[in-house]
Amino acid sequence: MANAYASLNTSHTPEQVWALIGGFNSLPDWLPFITESICSEGGRVRSLKDPEGNSIVERLQTFDEQQRTYSYSIISSPFPVTDYLATLRVQANGRGSLVEWFGEFTPAGVSDADAEALFKGIYEGGLEALAKNLD
């Protein structure tokens, strides 16, 4: 298995950050490379579209409002990986927050390094967009 990790330290409280990103269907609210999110199966599956019209379908695996974290898997996507499981988490960090986005996956047709670089870039780009949306 390969993995990727990115984090963001922000002066915003965990409650402020979680209010923006804590909903499983909230990606279009803060992530510019997801333009649409439609939930099904009682909110446990989200069907996403990116600006180019690519489709990504993800399933919510765990959700903990108290701990401000959720994990999800990919059902289908254009990404060259299988067995994908990622977590988005917000924790108190001094007077602000630490936001972490990380995942593990099995590369399919690409090297571990290429798959890791792809998702590290997605996570880092997402957290940069989050920082802009918080300010």
Image (cartoon, rainbow, N blue to C red):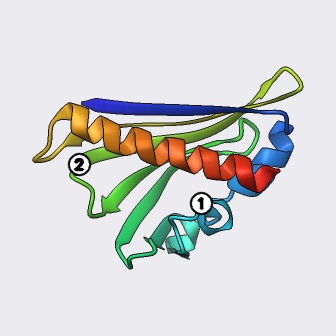
Which of the pair 22/101 is nearer the observer? 101
Q: Circles 1 and 2: CB distance less than 8 Å?
A: no
Q: Position of residue 57 (x, y in %)?
A: 39, 67
Residue 53 in percent (x, y) is at 38, 79
Query: How many labels, in total?
Result: 2
Mark nearest the camera among 1 and 2 is 1
x, y percent for residue 94: 85, 20
Q: Mark 2, residues whose alpha carbon is within 10 Å: few (<14), some, or many (≥20)?
A: many
Residue found at x 38% / y 67%: 56
In the picture, measured across the screen, residue 56 lies left or right of residue 89, that is: left
What residue lies at 10% left-to-right and 47% top-to-bottom?
A: 109
Look at the numbered disc 2 and give the secondary structure of its residue: strand
Amino acid type of the residue that numbered disc 2 sits on in the rendered structure? Val
Task: Measure the alpha-carbon separation of dots 1 and 2.
Answer: 21 Å
Looking at the image, is 105 positioned above or below residue 37? Answer: above
Amino acid identity at mark 1: Leu
**Residue 121 in view:** yes
Residue at disc 1, secondary structure: loop
Disc 1: CA contacts within 10 A as few (<14), some (14-19) or many (>=20): some
Give the residue at mark 1. Answer: 31
14 left or right of 47 in image: right
Residue linked to disc 2: 81
